[in-house]
Amino acid sequence: MAELLKMLTEVGGVSGDEGRVRQLIRQEVSPFVDDIYTDRMGNLIAYKKGTNSDKKVMLCAHMDEVGFIITGIGEDGMLKFKMVGGIDPRVLVSKRVLVGEKGYTGVLGIKAIHLQEPEEREHAVKVKQMYIDIGATSKEDASQVVKPGDYAVFDSRYVEFGDNKVKAKALDDRAGCAVLIELIKQKQRYDFDLYACFSVQEEVGLRGAEVLGYSINPDIAIVVEATTCSDVPGVEEHLYTTLMGKGPAITIMDSASYANKELVEMLINTAQKEGIPFQLKKGASGGNDAGRIHLAREGVKTVTVSIPCRYIHSPSSVMDLTDYKNTIRLISVFLKGCQLPTTCRGSGL
């Protein structure tokens, strides 16, 4: 599991540039599925035929990560850029990045503090004040290796540390992708067809999921996501969204969707029956691919199961491996017990 997470988080894949992530996932799951294909949007769909192909269950995790796109090159060789996805500008200064497909080293720079006016030091740095320094001496020099439209990602390595914790970039949502891969590798056959979908462009508007919801048209969908974990100093306990180490978080609602109440209840019943730690996600901010999937066609019964992550959308997100493993366990047991269309072992779906 650790090696899979390491591979997935260290590969670059900003929204709109998910090709390397897609290729890695395809290599991992191809031997375990009946079909695998990429749609026109770039979504990867892995299909496992069921013993009764009358019904369809969809799992979804997004491949893309937040990052940067190069918008220009200055005469001094410094790169102008825009952020892709929601990143707090306060985490950017002096961070290392990898630019372009070949991963040229760059540093997110700003005017040195010694040269700043006193009033400048009192305000958070704005993105328009920053640049990416790749060590070029001129525009001509930089243009030899980088061009506008190239992407850049945080240069951050997967590290295991502390009490069963991991640090990496892109845990949102490569951790979800890893969960789907582990589920696919199980030799289980279900009463329904299983579609494990790895979506694109979630961080810029849930775009890939909108296409997937329409094309797959599943009976139910489970979105597997990494979500904010705010159990840190400076945040009052009643404002915690999730708690690290307390199990996967089941979403009731967020700014993009309401979870299907029957599916929420079924997941809770499954966790309680199997003794799997879980929590309900508190707060309703943010959104994920469920926001588009549940609106597809005549509507799709959709629920989200999330892994708590601290410092999300940064170079150093942190996750508890126990939460990750319990997420796999919860969804695995749920799928094994799920009988569509009218029953799901004790629940009337």
Image (tube, grey):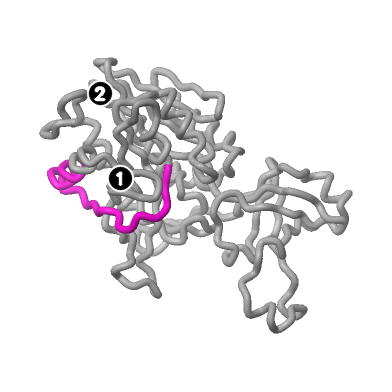
Q: Is residue 63 left or right of residue 73?
A: left
Residue 43 drawn at (x, y percent): 50, 30
Residue 179 visible in rendering: yes
Residue 7 visible in rendering: no
**Label 1 amino acid?**
Thr
Q: Is the N terminus in the top left, top right, bottom left or bottom right quadrant?
A: top left
Residue at numbered disc 2: 190
**Quick check: marks 1 and 2 in contact, CB under 8 Å?**
no
Residue at numbered disc 1: 327
Which residues are drawn in magenta? 267-288
Q: Assess disc 1: are there few (<14), some (14-19) or many (≥20) residues with their C-alpha within 10 Å of its C-alpha.
A: many
- Disc with the residue nearer the chain's start (1 vs 2): 2
The mark tally for this picture is 2
Residue occupying the point 71% across, 43% down: 150
Judged from the image, the secondary structure of the residue bearing numbered disc 1 is: helix
User: Is 263 a magenta residue?
Assistant: no
Q: CA distance from mark 1 to mark 2?
A: 19 Å
Q: Assess disc 2: are there few (<14), some (14-19) or many (≥20) residues with their C-alpha within 10 Å of its C-alpha.
A: many
Residue occupying the point 25% across, 42% down: 330
Residue 309 drawn at (x, y percent): 40, 56
**Label 2 amino acid?**
Tyr
**Quadrant assignment, res 161:** bottom left
The disc at residue 96 is: none
Judged from the image, the secondary structure of the residue bearing numbered disc 2 is: loop
Residue occupying the point 20% across, 30% down: 338
